[in-house]
């Protein structure tokens, strides 16, 4: 069987803890042949751990050795690397968000189409069992009316790596984590075009000194990304989306919630539940068992590889990922300037 030769660009945590182990579990479909990082020592260390034969600190050097690249760098470099990879004739899997701005996303899509190559974005929540079940059950919901999203963490600003670096990441809680739930909500309701986006962007809490934080430490004096965001989005089909995400909310506990109310019924994704009115009764249904894999990483990686090999259609379309970035841009534009 033909195998896809993959190069990893960026040897940080997301590469080591998600993509490398996952690709190696799919060794009947792919081979991780190269790894690149600006920190050559780190790249070599990871290569030794995963028995990767080619190591470099210049991503251009690995292009001739692979069929596809997996981009695991800070967000700032997504578009630059993807465009270069397409120009070299390679397929691209890029971690979310697609890029810093919608304009960069458009450049990525245009170059991928010109090259005739696959562009996939790492919105792995779509591959959770609950999300897959919800997508199948949208026929029970009918025309969607109101979508509610909460992606909230109680005092868990990621105080490691580049997560709070606005220049490298473009933002904070919204572009890092909330984007997953925004993407999932849009996908479930069929990605209708947005007609109105309003929002509020906050970081007051993380600017206060000596705040408790479960996930590492950060400098409150230089903190300039969002730690809490709210938004209201309207769509051309009349649906509306109520959205809230936070790294550092003063709430009782973390909350991951996505629910949809439609004309015929409603559903909740986490946990998956279905709400309908039939035969003069209100029915709330829970699934005692859901098909699919426990972790979304494997089906996500398999979908990318098979799409590159011409055996499957992409689940995450690049134009859909562009919509996520376009809405994020509008929320940041309308939400006010952070200090």
Image (cartoon, rainbow, N blue to C red):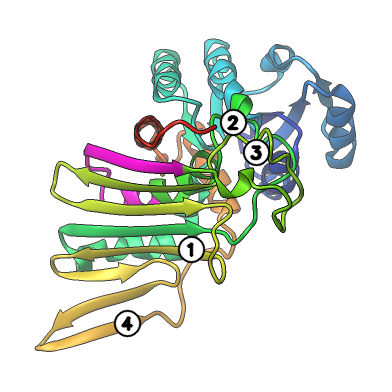
Q: Which residue is under mark 3?
A: 163
Task: State which tag comes first along the sequence, 1 or 2.
Answer: 2
Seen at 46% across and 69% down, the residue is 291
**Quadrant in which residue 204 is drawn:** top right
Return the mark for residue 169: 2
Q: Residue at x 58, y 54 (%)?
A: 248
The magenta segment is: 184-201
- Pick whichever, 249 or 108, lies toward us: 249
Lower sequence index among marks 2 and 4: 2
Front label number (3 vs 4): 3
Q: Is residue 209 visible?
A: yes
Q: Earlier in the sequence, mark 3 or mark 2?
A: 3
Question: Marks 2/4: CA distance?
Answer: 40 Å
Could you classify mark 2 by the number of other residues whose Cα lies within 10 Å: few (under 14), some (14-19), or many (20 or more)? many
Q: Is residue 50 magenta?
A: no
Residue identifier under label 1 = 256
Query: Can you identify the residue that label 4 sits on?
Result: 285
Q: Depth check: give the residue in front, 194 or 211.
A: 211
Q: Is residue 284 left or right of residue 308?
A: left
- Cα gap from disc 4 to disc 1, whole angstroms: 19 Å
Answer few, some or many: residues within 10 Å of disc 1's Cα (few below 14, many 20 plus, some between 14 and 19).
some
Q: Secondary structure at mark 2?
A: helix
Mark 3 residue crowding within 10 angstroms, few (<14) / some (14–19) / many (20+): many
Above or below, comparing residue 95 to residue 247 in the picture: above
Cα–Cα gap, marks 3 and 2: 7 Å
Q: Are marks 3 and 2 in contact (CB under 8 Å)?
A: yes
């Amino acid at each position: 069987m033909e195998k896809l030769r993959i190069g990893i660009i960026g040897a940080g945590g997301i590469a080591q803890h998600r993509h490398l182990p996952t690709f190696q579990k799919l060794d009947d479909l792919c081979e991780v042949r190269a790894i690149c990082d600006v920190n050559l020592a780190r790249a070599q260390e990871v290569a030794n751990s995963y028995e990767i034969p080619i190591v470099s600190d210049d991503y251009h050097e690995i292009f001739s050795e692979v069929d596809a690249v997996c981009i695991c760098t800070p967000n700032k470099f997504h578009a630059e690397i993807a465009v270069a990879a397409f120009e070299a004739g390679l397929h691209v899997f890029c971690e979310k968000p697609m890029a810093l701005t919608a304009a960069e996303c458009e450049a990525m899509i245009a170059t991928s189409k010109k090259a005739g190559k696959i562009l996939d974005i790492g919105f792995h929540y779509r591959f959770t069992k609950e999300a897959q079940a919800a997508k199948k059950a949208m026929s029970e919901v009918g025309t969607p009316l109101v979508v509610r999203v909460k992606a909230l963490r109680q005092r868990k600003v990621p105080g490691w790596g580049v997560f709070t670096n606005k220049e490298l990441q473009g933002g904070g809680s919204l572009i890092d984590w909330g984007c997953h739930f925004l993407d999932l909500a849009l996908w479930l309701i069929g990605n209708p075009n947005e007609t109105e986006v309003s929002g509020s962007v906050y970081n007051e809490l993380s600017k206060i000194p000596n705040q408790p934080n479960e996930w590492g430490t950060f400098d409150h004096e230089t903190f300039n990304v969002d730690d809490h965001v709210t938004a209201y989005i309207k769509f051309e089909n009349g649906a509306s989306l109520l959205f809230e995400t936070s790294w550092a909310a003063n709430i009782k506990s973390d909350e991951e919630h996505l629910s949809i109310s439609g004309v015929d019924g409603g559903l909740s994704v986490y946990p998956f539940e279905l709400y309908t009115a039939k035969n003069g009764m209100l029915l709330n249904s829970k699934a005692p068992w859901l098909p699919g894999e426990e972790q979304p990483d494997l089906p996500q990686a398999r979908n990318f590889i098979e799409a590159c090999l011409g055996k499957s259609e992409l689940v995450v379309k690049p134009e859909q990922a562009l919509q996520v970035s376009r809405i994020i841009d509008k929320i940041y534009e309308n939400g006010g300037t952070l200090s």
